């Protein structure tokens, strides 16, 4: 599976965390969830953590899309 990319996050002064994907809002975390996210992002690969927290992670069609004639190289 290819590694996710294009995710960024911004920690705001009020403690919220805004996650974007290719400059589009993907999610906002507040309170304890924001703290837990920041701890996971610091400990692991932030791209994978953001993909998992926003729900854009393993939809199940990766293999089908990879084998489609348009995506073969």
Image (cartoon, rainbow, N blue to C red):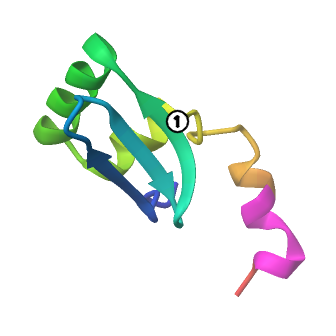
Q: Is residue 59 above or below residue 9?
A: above
At a point 60% along the width and 39% down the height, the residue shown is 58
Residue 41 locus on image (x, y percent):
21, 39
Instruction: In this rendered view, identify the residue nearer to me: 53 or 19.
Output: 19
At a point 85% along the width and 68% down the height, the residue shown is 68
- SS at badge 1: helix
Q: Is residue 69 magenta?
A: yes
Q: Is residue 32 above or below residue 53?
A: above
Q: Is residue 55 magenta?
A: no
Residue 12 locus on image (x, y percent):
25, 41
Residue 8 locus on image (x, y percent):
36, 57
30 relative position to 72: left or right: left
Secondary structure predominantly adopted by residues drawn in magenta: helix
| Residue stretch in magenta | 65-71
23 relative position to 16: left or right: right
Instruction: In this rendered view, identify the residue nearer to me: 58 or 29.
Output: 29
């Amino acid at each position: 599976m290819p590694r996710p990319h294009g995710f960024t996050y911004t920690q705001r002064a009020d403690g919220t965390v805004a996650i974007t994907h290719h400059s589009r809002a993907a999610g906002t975390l507040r309170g304890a969830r924001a703290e837990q996210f920041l701890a996971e992002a610091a400990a692991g690969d932030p791209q994978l953590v953001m993909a998992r927290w926003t729900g854009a992670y393993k939809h199940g069609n990766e293999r089908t899309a990879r084998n489609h004639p348009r995506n073969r190289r």
